[in-house]
């Protein structure tokens, strides 16, 4: 006959219980997602494993509990900017891919200046190369002060569009809330880090709001925190978001010619923007 565990030990086991179950649920969800994008579980290299840890963090985090989630008044302002400025000042707005339109850039500059907004879109494959998706910097050029956005066009067009939206979000945040660090790079493997900073989540919120209009909300609705037994629901929502977004950018994550690490990366990005969009809907009613 074995003795019952001491109360403190029992408490520790009980408190560890749900976490272990959620971890198992996340593992189950990840393996379903990987088989969906045909990334073989048995042959994962270090790069893919690093991307997977970011994906797990994104999937297991309750976005409603993230302190850096922008507060309702700020989300309302941003949503208005997306609807009335971004969508209305782009000649034929069809989605994120149109954010680089010169008309929109000059409209945003008039609204959120005085810093002049300059966009540089080029393929960077050397040095930091593909690991860099984009960044911004503020510069004084003669009498002008500029906000220069660099976007690495060597990425898939869907990722390029999201990066541009993110950097425009920093420009707008600087005007609405105040300018933060002088220089921020949008490097790979860093989505989980965005959950720690309000300006990063604000910048991502621009992407989420522009990508998922209010018309898609009845399909997306709010996502409940991942609980034991609930991963099929999140799996189906990610899948339906992918079905909506994928064809728009001709993005096929199951295609073998795209490296596995990138397929996991883009999947993480999609899950992040989807969860963020649902959290904005749930927290701000937008
Ligand atoms: Zn950023």
Image (cartoon, helix red, strand yellow):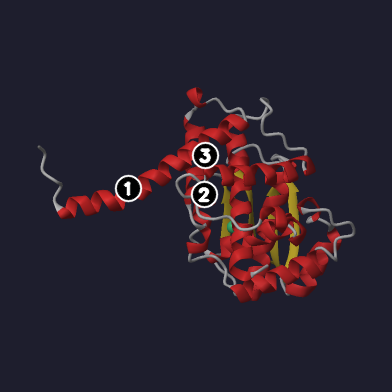
Q: Can you give x and y, in whole percent of width and height, for residue 249 in the image?
A: 77, 42
Q: Residue at x 58, y 53 (%)?
A: 185
Distance from Cα at disc 2 to Cα at disc 1: 21 Å
Outermost residue toward the right? 91
Q: Earlier in the sequence, mark 2 or mark 1?
A: 1
Mark sitting on residue 70: none
Mark count? 3
Tell me the quadrant of the picture where the C terminus can be found. Answer: bottom right
With 106 as the anchor, is 183 left or right in this view?
left
Is residue 39 or residue 169 the one in the foreground?
39
Mark sitting on residue 17: 1
Q: Nearer the viewer, mark 3 or mark 1?
A: 1
**Mark 3 vs 2: CB contact within 8 A:** no
Mark sitting on residue 29: 3
* Location of residue 273 with respect to 31 vertically, above or below: below
Q: Which residue is mark 2?
A: 58
Tell me the quadrant of the picture where the N terminus can be found. Answer: top left
Q: Is residue 139 visible?
A: no
Q: Residue at x 69, y 64 (%)?
A: 147
Is residue 276 or residue 9 the one in the foreground?
9
Name the quadrant where ligand 1 sits: bottom right
- Binning the other alpha carbons within 10 Å of mark 2 as few (below 14), some (14 to 19) or many (20 upward) gives many
* Helix, strand or loop for disc 2: helix
Q: Is residue 85 visible?
A: yes
* Residue 33, image quadrant: top right
Q: Nearer the viewer, mark 3 or mark 2?
A: 3
Q: Residue at x 85, y 57 (%)?
A: 93
* Helix, strand or loop for disc 1: helix
* Location of residue 150 with respect to 1 vertically, above or below: below
Is residue 96 or residue 125 the one in the foreground?
96
Q: Can you give x and y, in whole percent of width and height, for residue 239 in the image?
A: 65, 41
Distance from Cα at disc 3 to Cα at disc 1: 19 Å
């Amino acid at each position: 006959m074995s003795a019952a565990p001491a109360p403190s030990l029992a408490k520790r086991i009980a408190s560890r219980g749900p976490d272990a179950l959620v971890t198992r649920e996340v593992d189950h969800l990840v393996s379903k997602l990987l088989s969906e994008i045909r990334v073989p579980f048995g042959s994962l290299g270090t790069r893919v494993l690093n991307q997977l840890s970011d994906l797990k963090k994104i999937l297991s985090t309750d976005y409603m509990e993230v302190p850096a989630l922008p507060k309702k008044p700020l989300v309302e302002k941003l949503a208005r900017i997306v609807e009335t400025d971004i969508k209305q000042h782009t000649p034929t707005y069809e989605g994120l891919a149109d954010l680089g339109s010169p008309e929109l850039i000059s409209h945003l500059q008039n609204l959120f200046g005085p810093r002049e907004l300059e966009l540089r879109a080029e393929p960077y494959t050397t040095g930091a190369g593909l690991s860099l998706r984009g960044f911004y910097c503020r510069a004084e050029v003669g009498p002008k002060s500029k906000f220069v956005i660099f976007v690495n066009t060597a990425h898939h067009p869907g990722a390029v569009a999201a990066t541009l939206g993110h950097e425009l979000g920093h420009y707008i945040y600087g005007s609405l809330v105040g300018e933060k660090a002088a220089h921020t790079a949008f490097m790979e493997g860093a989505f989980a880090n965005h959950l720690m900073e309000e300006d990063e989540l604000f910048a991502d919120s621009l992407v989420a709001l522009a990508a998922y209009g209010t018309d898609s909300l009845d399909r997306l609705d709010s996502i409940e925190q991942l609980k034991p037994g609930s991963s099929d629901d999140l799996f189906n929502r990610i899948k339906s978001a992918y079905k909506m977004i994928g064809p728009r950018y001709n993005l096929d994550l199951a295609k073998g010619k795209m490296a596995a690490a990138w397929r996991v990366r883009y999947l993480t990005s999609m899950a992040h923007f989807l969860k963020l969009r649902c959290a904005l809907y749930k927290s701000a009613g937008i």
